[in-house]
Amino acid sequence: SYDLAQPPSVSVSPGQTASLTCSGDELGSKYVSWYQQKPGQSPVLVIYQDSRRPSGIPERFSGSNSGNTATLTISGTQAMDESDYYCQTWDNRTVVFGGGTKLTVL
Amino acid sequence: EVQLLESGGGLVQPGGSLRLSCTTSGFVFKAYALSWVRQAPGKGLEWVSVIGTTGDSPYYADSVKGRFTVSRDNSKTTIYLQMNSLRDEDTALYYCAKGGEPGYSSAWYIDSWGQGTLLAVSS
């Protein structure tokens, strides 16, 4: 089975740039999506197909995917961005989620 | 506005069965693949199953294969998850989720989620 690895936690200061990584074998050859989940809420799509941003998602969210690593970048991180973030891809007729990264803004 | 409303969760004994439903509105139901994703208490997201537009090509996570069956009724804009031989580790909040584009492919992603229905498996 295909695995996606995410660091359990990332910390960033307000206004700085947060880089959240998602790693997998030849991940750059697949499409990656990212979801934000706040406590007690359903996930929200923030990036799809590597770098596309859904309507309503702030421009400070961006994504890239190359080699074995996909990256979600949050520029000018705000306190409201503190959440869990999950990457997701599709492999061999299965949907795969990463284990999630808890982003702390402090 | 896309709406996904899960129902059917509850407390079940190990080995028991339960059927979850997800009633939808706000989009052309027959054009989109839909999925079940679960989240155990305090844990991450775990994909369970996805069903294509006609219902004839469902896929499952290894952890539920042979025990769970996903189906859809396009006339009722509803999908179901029949869960048999339930185990303690199936305890989770089960989300219904809609694909972001018609059909599904290697670019498949989820653009809408329900609020979830809670399954607890315990004796």
Image: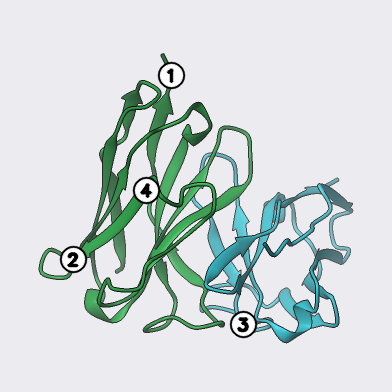
Which residue is disc 1 drawn over?
B122
The N terminus of chain A lies in which quarter of the figure?
bottom right
**Res A49 label:** 3
The shade of chain B is green
Label 2 is placed on what type of residue? Thr
Give me the C-alpha separation between circle 2 and circle 1. 31 Å
Residue B111 percent location from the top left of the image: 46, 70
Label 4 is placed on what type of residue? Phe
Give me the C-alpha separation between circle 3 and circle 2. 27 Å
Which of the chains bears the disc numbered 1? B
- Badges 1 and 3, same chain: no
Give me the C-alpha separation between circle 1 and circle 3. 39 Å
Label 1 is placed on what type of residue? Ser
Give me the C-alpha separation between circle 4 and circle 2. 20 Å
Q: Nearer the viewer, residue B32 or B24?
A: B32
The shade of chain A is cyan
Residue A60 percent location from the top left of the image: 73, 74
Above or below — where is B68 with respect to A75? above
In the rendered image, which quarter is residue B10 located in?
Answer: top left
Above or below — where is B87 with respect to A61? above
- Mark 4 and mark 2 lie on one chain; the one further toward the N terminus is 4
